[in-house]
Amino acid sequence: MLPRLLCTSLIVGGLAVAGGCSKSEPSKAELDSASAPIKASAVIEKKPGVEKAPQSGVDYHSFANSNDYQVQHLDLDLTVDFSRKVLEGEAKLDFKRLNDKNLPMVLDTRELEVVSVSANGAPVKFSMGEKDSHLGTPLNIELPEDADSITIRYRTAPGASGVQWLEPQQTAGKKHPFLFTQAQAIHARSFIPLQDSPKVRITYNATVRTPKELRAVMSANNDPQAAKDGVYEFEMPQRIPSYLIALAVGDLKFKPMGERTGVYAEPSMLESAAAEFADTESMLEVTEKAYGPYHWDRYDLLILPPSFPFGGMENPRLSFITPTVIAGDKSLVALIAHELAHSWSGNLVTNASWRDLWLNEGFTTYLTNRIMQFVYGDERYQMEMALGYDDLQADLADKEPRDEIMAIDLRGRDPDEVFSNIPYEKGSLFLYELEQKVGREAFDRFLMEYFNHFSFQSITTEDFVKYLDKTLLVEHADKLDRERILEWIFDPGIPEGAPHPKSDAFTKLDPVRQQWLDGKLAAKDIDTKGWTFHQWKYFLDGMPEKLTEAQLKELDGAFGLTESRNNEVAFSWLMIAVRNDYEPAFERLENFLTSIGRNKFLRPLYRNMVETGKKDVAARIFERAKVGYHPLTVKVNSLVIYGKKES
Ligand SMILES: [Zn+2]
């Protein structure tokens, strides 16, 4: 996902060892990979109260006993009830037994009301276990010895963490309600009872029943020609992890952009979205050429209402996209490259647990930059890389050492709350260093083979290192240092001598900014003709902590920053306005915070307000805005503003 996005964006939580989670024992394969000759993190081992590093391949964020049973296929039949804000129906899970113990099957749920459970057609006993604040509630099911499928009748809670119900006034068209799901990281369990772990891959079929005037789409084979009769059928024939199951329902229209690409959006946004993202087909073609075949048939985009908490979500065949990147000049389409790249890194080769998220996001961020270069050229590539590097530096300055580790220890913590740029930008910088050392051609070949080798598999950090041991580290033994690679993955910070991507388009702005700060150049005399949003962002983000009222007025007067229609530029400016108490921008700040739900923007702004003594203002705006926010946005920003979760 991307918060960028974060794909997603976030952080907190006390350190504890796998609390409250009734896990089955790790399998032999997991223990083998845990005991592989790979450096354990010295930092984790030295932490008081934590006895050992997390075990590779163990999912500390799922109750499911996926080492006893492995679900293979899901048949979903759901009715969408907008008046009650409930999804209601049944999930049939076909599973394979991995041993003959016939233990109760444990599934993940969160706030689900389970009505009945049957196995191969006959009712069976079930019970709900103890609720965990991060993980939800285990559903324990007693199985007859010959059972190979179970059917669960259930309904979701109106406040389900993975489902957002929007009132008509929260949509672009204002006439119809809208619904979308967001399952990553551990929210699929709030709308489907299942083994909610990225190491379990399933195929699915779904029937979704909606009000007749609306259209349903899923991360599956969407048919834009399907009659709008209130019943939609879907099939996802490729095996995907549960966090990629996604559904949206609304007043949606479709417009093709290319042979395999198109866009779904509310009617009023359809044309502008299709124009903004017109290069999607070219992106798809260049990525295939460099990294191997696209395995998912079509690649369509779904444009969501502004409350979507992330930049985008890489739901297979149908990425979910925030409308905040429709800038009118394609300046923010790196987000599309990012979600598309996930079709290889993430959806095809998937992190086995959330500790391994960097395998999804680091590879995807690296690929994003390369796609931007293929399609838009070197200057854009350098700028994207340099901005990513700056984001990484900002996070490194801000995080505790344990959260700077790519293979992060998330035991006892909620993955949503630990979200940061580290798996994205540090992961990408690491791959960029490998590329620099072995040469681009060799590295591209390696990536293509890696995606092919692990296609449709979920892998751990240790699987990746073992693969490196057999490939790049053999082929380029003279150029690579294994210890240094382990330092990148298992230690905080970045290794000494790491690459520092720069862009001439940015560095030439440094003296301009300095001259203005020194009073030697008036803002109105700065030649900003042809500046891209990237340059505006760089120019603004490089401003000192404090500016005078006169300086703020001069900048705003010369460039109309408070009124900027580019959300990234507006965000950078509002961050400056907040920390300098620049009141003329506060009305825009309030509008921005109440009309956009993207956490990449909201969280830093709220945090900045709290840290600069404006907690009351932050709380007032948040309380007014939160009815329009996604449950995740409410959760993480409550933490920022009040230091605790909403009850
Ligand atoms: Zn992502």
Image (cartoon, grey):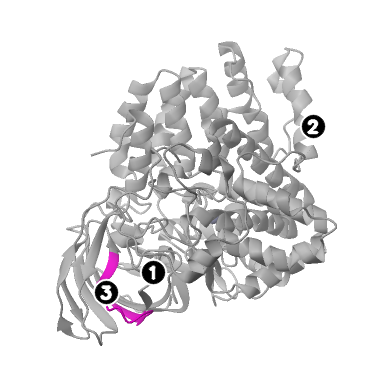
Image height of 84 relative to 418, above or below: below
Q: Position of residue 60 (x, y in %)?
A: 40, 56
Identify the residue under disc 3: 103
Give the extent of the magenta segment.
92-107
Q: Which mark is residue 621?
A: none
Image height of 167 relative to 576, above or below: below
Contact, mark 1 vs mark 2 (Cβ under 8 Å): no
- Circle 2 packing at 10 Å, graded few (<14), some (14-19), many (20+), is few
| Cα–Cα span, label 3 and label 1 | 37 Å
Q: Quadrant of ligand 1?
A: bottom right
Q: Which mark is residue 217?
A: 1
Labels 2, 3: front one? 3
**Badge 3 element:** loop
Using the image as rendered, state which of residue 255 and residue 603 is in the foreground: 603
Using the image as rendered, state which of residue 107 and residue 292 is in the foreground: 107
Residue at position x 22%, y 86% in the image: 120
Circle 3: residue type: Leu
Q: Which mark is residue 508?
A: 2
Residue at position x 35%, y 69% in the image: 216
Left of 31 or right of it: where is 114?
left
Q: Position of residue 417 (x, y in %)?
A: 41, 43
**Badge 1 element:** strand
Is residue 504 found inside the magenta-colored segment of the image? no
Q: Position of residue 618 (x, y in %)?
A: 36, 27
| Cα–Cα span, label 2 and label 3 | 66 Å
Using the image as rendered, state which of residue 272 and residue 53 is in the foreground: 53
Question: Residue 106 is drawn in which quadrant?
Answer: bottom left
Q: Quadrant of the C terminus?
A: top left
Q: Is residue 369 visible?
A: yes
Question: Residue 276 is drawn in which quadrant?
Answer: bottom right
Disc 2 CB within 8 Å of nearest ligand 1 atom: no
